Image (cartoon, grey):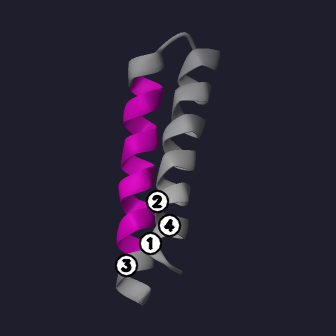
Amino acid sequence: MNYAGVGFAFVTCLFLGAGIGMIFNNLELGGALGLGAGFLILALFRKKG
């Protein structure tokens, strides 16, 4: 996957985490979870290629 695709996946994780945080009235926790998931996605895609 190219860098643009990995960046899109990272930003998607951030937005999904923030959305989940808004559902549970805790935006900071949701953003932190999205950030952590985004970093995992970055690490997995960069390791592959």
Mark 2 secondary-structure assignment: helix
Q: Position of residue 26 (x, y in %)?
A: 47, 14
* 2 or 3: tag closer to the N-terminus: 2
Name the residue nearer the viewer: 5 or 17: 5
Q: At 45% across and 64% down in the image, what residue appears?
A: 41
Where does the magenta region start and end?
29-44
Name the residue nearer the viewer: 36 or 12: 12
**Residue pointed to by mark 3:** 46
Against 2, residue 21 (above or below) is above
The tag on residue 30 is none
Name the residue nearer the viewer: 33 or 6: 6
**Mark 4 and mark 3 in contact (Cβ < 8 Å)?**
no
Three-letter residue code for mark 1: Tyr
- Label 3: how many residues lie within 10 Å, few (<14), some (14-19) or many (20+)? few
Q: At 57% across and 47% down in the image, what residue appears?
A: 12
**Mark 3 and mark 2 in contact (Cβ < 8 Å)?**
no
**Residue pointed to by mark 4:** 4
The tag on residue 7 is 2
C-alpha distance separating marks 3 and 4: 12 Å
Q: Nearer the viewer, mark 3 or mark 1?
A: 1
**Mark 1 and mark 4 in contact (Cβ < 8 Å)?**
yes
Mark 4 secondary-structure assignment: helix
- Label 4: how many residues lie within 10 Å, few (<14), some (14-19) or many (20+)? few
Mark 3 secondary-structure assignment: helix
Three-letter residue code for mark 4: Ala
Three-letter residue code for mark 3: Arg
Three-letter residue code for mark 2: Gly
**Mark 2 and mark 4 in contact (Cβ < 8 Å)?**
yes
Q: At 64% across and 17% down in the image, what residue appears?
A: 23
Q: Is residue 39 left or right of residue 14?
A: left
**Residue pointed to by mark 1:** 3
